[in-house]
């Protein structure tokens, strides 16, 4: 049976680059790998065919000879691409990781595993976020066992090298013509076993305790800010390094202010007399002082005024946001007879000049109705 053209086997052109060649090989090798197609003789044949073609074309000299003489260049001991070469092992390790999600290279187990990171949710007030604070947190976590000093072994003994993997933490397993490397089932990748475990920690090298930690919350933190305390997480297994503790901050809703970055927004009701005649009002600021806001005569409901520097501090800087005061003109309720009479008299004395927005609206309504052909009158 004649051999197929190597370029045809890999699905590339004769002018393809090394990168294109390698990419085509990796894609097809993963597709036809015997471990992905157990018992499929056709896939096993294609996989060997792919390997042979790639072994030749990835080598510049062999590729030049193949381009000139074809398969004849490697007949009768000419150095054809049969079997697995050393260079192939390097390239195929990438494919191994794609197939099985692990490295094909051996690695020793140390038995010292890093502890897990911990998360602590803390809710603070807006005032605390403004000024910053030192807080205490109580966290149940794993700490190094004092009895065995984290080794997990009974006092006077030490962990032994795993007899299954010889301390490597991994075992090799032959599957077809390919060798897999998996975590050792005896020591679970640690490379060591404890024959006589510590009674206090049952061989884990750590025990559960409640710890009290000091947390410095800087001024200006925002909702969702994360504070990392290095090395304050769970203790590592059998003397391994500890994990980290992450403090996640959330801000309680405030009864006066809404926060937008470093700026604060506050809604303040004012009487219609204040809005009409103008005045100066005092608004409480987040720092405890009183911010004076000048309300000009004729102020409309929804108008907003800025007070510089009365917002939140910007985290780790000397800058400060602003306070925005939005006024809401309040309509009086439960009027007395005399008050109603005065308002009715005021309405009679009102003109387009005193209520320009209402007059402008009425004008736009009339124009709209005229455009519809409606000649009827409209009044508020």
Image (tube, rainbow, N blue to C red):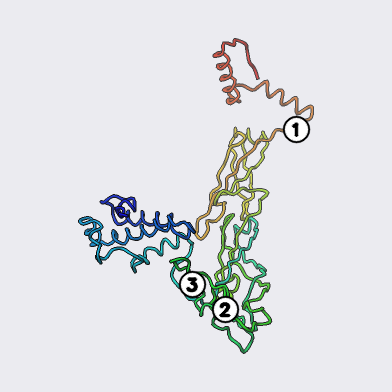
Q: Determine which of the numbered discs, if any, sits on residue 333 in the image.
A: 1
Q: For this view, does 24 lie left or right of residue 152?
A: left
Within 10 Å of disc 1 (Cα), the crowding (few <14, some 14-19, many 20+) is few
Q: Is 239 rendered above or below residue 62?
A: below
Q: Nearer the viewer, residue 376 or 140?
A: 140
Furthest toward the left, the residue is 68
Q: Nearer the viewer, residue 279 or 138?
A: 138
Q: Nearer the viewer, residue 136 or 2?
A: 2
Q: Residue at x 60, y 60 (%)?
A: 248
Within 10 Å of disc 2 (Cα), the crowding (few <14, some 14-19, many 20+) is many
Residue 221: percent from left, percent from top: 57, 58
Mark 3–mark 2 Cα distance, whole angstroms, equals: 27 Å
Element on which disc 3 rests: strand
The mark total stands at 3
Q: Is 174 rendered above or below residue 60?
A: below
Q: What residue does disc 3 label?
A: 172
Q: Is 355 rendered above or below residue 167?
A: above
Mark 1–mark 2 Cα distance, whole angstroms, equals: 73 Å
Furthest toward the bottom, the residue is 156
Q: Determine which of the numbered discs, if any, sits on residue 239 in the image.
A: 2
Task: Name which of mark 3 and mark 2 comes first in the sequence.
Answer: 3
Mark 3–mark 1 Cα distance, whole angstroms, equals: 86 Å
- Quadrant of the image containing the N terminus: bottom left
Q: For this view, does 58 lie left or right of residue 252?
A: left
Residue 321: percent from left, percent from top: 53, 51
Q: Residue at x 75, y 33 (%)?
A: 333
Residue 11: percent from left, percent from top: 34, 50
Image quadrant assignment for residue 227? bottom right
Q: Residue at x 53, y 58 (%)?
A: 315
Q: Determine which of the numbered discs, if any, sits on residue 111 in the image.
A: none
Within 10 Å of disc 3 (Cα), the crowding (few <14, some 14-19, many 20+) is some
Element on which disc 1 rests: loop
């Amino acid at each position: 049976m004649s051999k197929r053209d190597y370029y045809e086997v890999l699905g590339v052109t004769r002018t393809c680059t090394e990168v294109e060649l390698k990419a085509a090989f990796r894609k097809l090798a993963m597709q036809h790998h015997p471990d992905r197609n157990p018992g499929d003789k056709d896939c096993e044949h294609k996989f060997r065919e792919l390997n042979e073609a790639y072994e030749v074309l990835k080598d510049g000299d062999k590729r030049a000879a193949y381009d000139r003489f074809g398969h004849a260049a490697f007949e009768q001991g000419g150095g054809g691409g049969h079997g697995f070469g050393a260079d192939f092992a390097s390239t195929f390790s990438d494919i191994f990781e794609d197939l099985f999600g692990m490295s094909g290279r051996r690695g020793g187990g140390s038995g010292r595993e890093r502890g897990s990171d911990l998360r602590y949710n803390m809710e603070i007030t807006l005032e605390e976020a403004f000024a910053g604070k030192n807080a205490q947190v109580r966290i149940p976590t794993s700490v190094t066992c004092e009895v065995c000093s984290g080794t997990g072994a009974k006092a006077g003994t030490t962990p032994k090298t795993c007899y299954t993997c010889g301390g490597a933490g991994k075992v090799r397993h032959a599957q077809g013509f390919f060798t897999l490397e998996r975590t050792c089932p005896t020591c679970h990748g640690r490379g060591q076993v404890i024959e006589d475990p510590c009674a206090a920690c049952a061989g884990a090298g750590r025990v559960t305790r409640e710890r009290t930690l000091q947390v410095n919350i800087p001024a200006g933190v925002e909702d969702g800010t994360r504070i990392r305390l290095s090395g304050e997480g769970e203790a590592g297994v059998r003397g391994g390094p500890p994990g980290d503790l992450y403090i996640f901050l959330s801000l309680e809703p405030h009864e006066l202010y809404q926060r937008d970055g470093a700026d604060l927004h506050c809604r303040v009701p004012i009487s219609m007399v204040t809005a009409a005649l103008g005045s100066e009002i005092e608004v409480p600021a987040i720092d405890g002082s009183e911010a004076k806001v000048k309300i000009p005569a004729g102020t409309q409901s929804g108008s907003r005024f800025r007070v510089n520097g009365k917002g939140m501090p910007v985290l780790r800087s000397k800058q400060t946001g602003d306070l925005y005061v939005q006024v809401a003109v309040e309509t009086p309720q439960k009027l007395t007879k005399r008050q109603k009479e005065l308002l009715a008299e005021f309405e009679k004395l009102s003109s387009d000049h005193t209520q320009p927005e209402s007059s402008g609206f009425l004008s736009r309504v009339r124009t709209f109705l005229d455009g519809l052909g409606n000649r009827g009158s409209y009044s508020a």
